[in-house]
Amino acid sequence: MLESYLRERMKQKDILLMTHLVLGYPSFDDSFKIIEAMVEAGVDLMELQVPFSEPIADGPVILRANQKALESGATVERSLDLAKKVAQRFDIPFLIMTYYNILFKYGTDRFVAEMADRNLKGAIIPDLPPEEGGEYLKAMEKYVMAPILIFSPTTPFERMRYLANFARGFIYCVARKGVTGQDTSFSEELVSYLSRCRSATDLPLAVGFGVKQKEDVDFLKAKADIAVIGTQTIRIVEERGVHSVGDFIRGLR
Amino acid sequence: MITKRYYGQFGGAFLPEILVATFDELVAAFEAAKNDPSFWQEYQHVMSTYSCRPTPITFAENLTRFFGGPRIYVKREDLNHTGAHKANNVMGQGILVKRMGKTRVIAETGAGQHGVATATMAARFGFNCTIYMGEVDVWRQRPNVFWMERLGAQVVPVKEGTRILKDAINEAFRDWVSNMDDTHYVLGTACGPHPYPEMVAYLQSIIGKEARRQLLETEGKLPARVYACVGGGSNAMGIFSGFFDDPVELVGVEAGGDGLDTGRHASRLASKDGSIGVAQGYKTCFLQNGDGQMRETHSVAAGLDYVGVSPILASLKESGRVRFEAATDKEVLEAAALTIRKEGLIPALESAHAFAQAFKEAPGMSGDDIILINQSGRGDKDIFTIADAFNDPAWQKFIIKKAEAYRA
Ligand SMILES: Cc1ncc(COP(=O)(O)O)c(C=O)c1O
């Protein structure tokens, strides 16, 4: 169970790290190396994004990574195969992050069964609210996978409670409005939003969007349970190369 | 709870959490407007004083004689202010924006018609305005970019993805998730998450209401067939909805591009290439590959060059109420040329798809029948594309001279 794993880890560390990457970007070989470096640097869990041509919740950096991955031949099958390989090789939980059409076209139940078969632990589908996700949520329950749901600063408290009913593992709290990759101001406003999130659910809270340096991670300690590093690692890979990833991650905590 | 509405198996509201509250507000504003008779009155007043409603129907006498078949009527949406049916939707949403108290509007545009209409509305109502337009479309519909900028809109060329309409929609959503507090997204067609398909179809229904009444007044009977081009599907929904309860055959015409068997087209419903999927917040027939990745589309008409289609039309195809056909780029240019020469009407290349299909079918129909073609817009914006298609040497000389004058 994802939640019990996280709770164990939370006893040992003052904040957990979740990292993100786009499968097949810059290449599948590089994806493997990046994941290996992240695991060695001590990340606690990872979300692996299966590329989609219309990643509507993502900003320019991740959008372009999706497009480049697809242009260089990334497919759903190859993405799932790499996910399987790393889930076998490394001893941390891996989640799939993608958009609903990828599951829908594959067959939602079949996709979730394949995730379970590959020893993945859950999924984040940002364009699938529970109102539209009946089949997905049923399949996730059937295969004992954690559906990670999202809270946002515009989510009313009542709706947070409603969403929490369907969520397993943890809640992904989007730190601000907008898409991935923009700056976030780590402010009092964020603190009061996180305390609202905290009172809406007993699940661990992850905070993502705009977390990119040690100060941000430090800020989140005691206010959240998991810091999510997304766009920034893609920037690091693009600017400094795959070999810089390990040092970057180690520098965060 | 998200309000979702389905048409058969199509539609829905696949929203990122950050937009749920914004959609709640929009659904409430739209429901209130629908139930408030003063909304439609205000809408009609704006459309009859700022635009040109009711737009007439024109009897195309020369084309009728030329084909020797049914009596051909044309619904003149090209006579709207800014030259297309897009004005109907835009002014209606503009009134809603005022009622919601927002101060900024954003929109996507393909042909540029929706962008220009939105920019005029923003100028008139005093809103800030940003228009997203694929880089490819900026190039092929440049005159409209000029007008949007003159009207005070900021035009953002979209360089991502296939750089056409769908990519402009994605960018508009990316803007909206940051700025929803003061910003309304004026979606230009009957696509996207609920309430857009219903709301845009509702505002465009003014076309069909008028056309039905006008035909009964002039001819005393209903048409046998109604033709409309289908991009996202808003002009088609607008004119078709006037005839849903009548024994009238409705024909939606998609972009056949280089031909349905070439793969280079934008025909989601008439070709075998479309399949059901979920993107841009709604479920419909998309042109996509087996993995669910959206494919590149092609059409000479930027406004029809789109991977998805109205969920309402997808459902009307499934139920058999609307027949879908495709016209190729070549057929469309020929139909435009014929219409210009025979009637002095200048249809937009989008609209010319409806003419092309009607011309294919007219010779086989009875002289007692009437057919109605929706001329969704005027062709002035297509002057460069049409000039290229006709390879007009005098025009080319002029352009070269003009360019030289700028260079000097
Ligand atoms: C003149 C004209 N007709 C038709 C369309 C296609 O849109 P819809 O299918 O929503 O009517 C456009 C879109 O830009 C247009 O400009």
Image (cartoon, coloured by chain):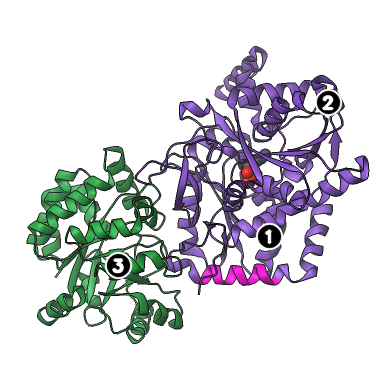
Chain colours: A green, B purple
**Quarter, ligand 1:** top right
* Residue placed furthest toward the bottom: A199
Which secondary structure, mark 2? Answer: helix
At which x and y percent is residue B326? 60, 32
Distance from disc 1 to disc 2, alpha carbons, whole Å, reads 39 Å
Instruction: Specify the label residue B64 is tagged with.
Output: 2
**Residues drawn in magenta:** B21-32
Residue at (31%, 47%) from the top-left corner?
A: A66
Q: Is residue A119 above or below residue B56?
A: below
Q: Quadrant of the C terminus of chain A?
A: bottom left
Type of amino acid at the residue the image marks with label 3: Met
Q: Is residue B346 above or below residue B305?
A: above
Quadrant of the rendered structure where residue B123 is? bottom right
Tell me: A249 left or right of B106: left
Give the residue at mark 3.
Answer: A140
Say if residue B50 shows up in the picture. no
Q: Is residue B268 above or below residue A245?
A: above
